[in-house]
Amino acid sequence: MVARVRTVAFRGVDTLDIDVQVHMGNGLPAFSIVGLPAKAVDESKDRVRAALSALGLALPPQRITVNLAPADVTKEGSHYDLPIAVGILVQMGVLPADEIAGYLVLGELALDGQLTEVSGILPAALGASARGAGIICPESCGPEAAWAGNIEVLAPRNLLALINHFKGSQVLTPPDPAGPEAAGALPDLADVKGQESAKRALEIAAAGGHNLLMTGPPGAGKSMLAARLPGLLPPLEPREALEVAMIRSVAGDLKGGRISRTRPYRDPHHSSSIPALVGGGLQARPGEVSLAHCGVLFLDELAEFPRTVLDSLRQSIETGQAVVSRANNRVTYPARFQLIAAMNPCRCGYLSDPAHACGRAPKCGLDYQARLSGPLLDRFDLRIEIEPVSARALAAPPEAEPSETVAARVARARQMQKRRFEAAGEEGIQQTNAGLNGRLLEQAARPEPAGQALMEEAAHRLSLSARGYHRILRVARTIADLEGSEPVRRTHVAEALAYRGIVLKQAA
């Protein structure tokens, strides 16, 4: 007889059915795990042996073979501990095989039989719901699994509680979904003095989900502006919040099972590698671009990132996905993020600044700019230069609009965009102007005749690529939405073109 327990392997935020098969037969006493187990899975036998011993149960003096099917899929992670232990207990007659068959089982075992938290519970619970099964997971993961809805969740604290539940001597109480994560206070735009044109660009970027590049000397306020973008964005829609939570769950970052409505804001250091930014590593974990899904990815000191790392972002910016390919594995994570970047105009940061003479201008700026590839720069919808704030502006009392006021305008503009997508029958996670494509782009963003003439003239003079041409149209559509205007006028096109200027100023 072979005992079977159901569990899952993770492929991005999707799950793959794994059948844990346990056989006990004659032969020299041994405990082996087959089916391409990774190191953490192969070590499960020692944790399982110690956990059963803590309960006063000894493994029978038989040859125990655990097969993880399908055998050609690599099994990674510590969540296989509990299904292996449950399979052995079924073989020993401690747990009923027919009842265990109705659950997906995940959990890591401590040496004393306690169940410890594992990652990926939310996508596993959603997968169990789609299969019409329940789920058995550690107690600390119960509130996260309960978000899956109408499924049975058993969340024991330890292995003994699970055994007692099926024997009827102890009933496990179904966990309640964890409450939403409390939204912390966000930096206010009113704290930024001066920089009116930069604030306008930030508002446009927030309203349309556009990518923004800010160039300016050190201390001009680039990072300060970027940190205030999340306060301008509307909260996550329920569908978006669930997708973000699934990615965080796989990454092991969904603490307490609390789902947040605040849009993610990620700001990796410029020493980050390609696996850290795009995803990868031994277990193909999600990278920063996926953890910023439906939110903001801020890259400070953009030119200090290795060029290969920056160019690895290009595909994710266009497709909204991060694809991690291996010889025997291919994982896809959602990665629909808004890219905000900041950089100095040159290595020293003071190109063309009369107060800080640069002895290597203009070559200093040209060499620094060359670190960024043309195709990457072409993916920024808005490119602005930020000037230093004068001492008089810094000493003046704050008169800027608070984030709350700007966020209200952004919310109205996004509602217009959402209605436009819904009227066209376009369903998707990104219903902003940055996602306009194809026929809908032609219908929604085509300017009036005067604006179209200006676009054609600019495209000729600036030698715009097709991507650049369409990105200007999207920005113009957003500017019109902020004004509540249905047609895209010449003034909207002119302002959008102004944000497509030269990235760096070159000294004469």
Image (cartoon, grey):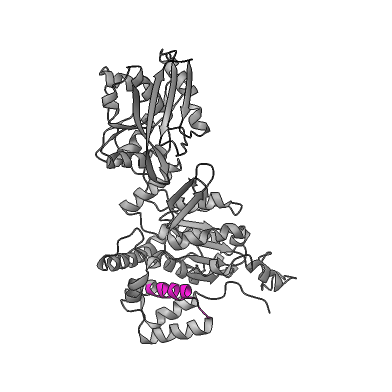
Q: Nearer the viewer, residue 346 or 139?
A: 139
Image coordinates for residue 357, horizontal then vertical, percent: 72, 71
In the visual, does 349 lie left or right of 158? right
Outermost residue toward the front?
A: 27
Q: Which residues are magenta?
A: 463-477
Specify whether residue 112 is in view: no
In the visual, does 126 lie left or right of 339? left
Query: For the point 29% across and 35% down, which residue is it?
Result: 176
Q: Nearer the viewer, residue 69 or 195?
A: 69
Query: For the point 33% across and 39% down, which residue is it?
Result: 125
Magenta span has 434? no
Image quadrant in which you'd find residue 169: top left
Query: In which quadrant is the N terminus drawn?
Result: top left
Image coordinates for residue 406, horizontal then vertical, percent: 39, 65
Please determine whether, in this image, residue 247 is positioned above or below residue 379. Answer: above
Image coordinates for residue 390, horizontal then vertical, percent: 59, 69
Specify whether residue 442 is in view: yes
Query: For the point 49% across and 22% down, which residue is it?
Result: 46
Image quadrant in which you'd find residue 79: top left
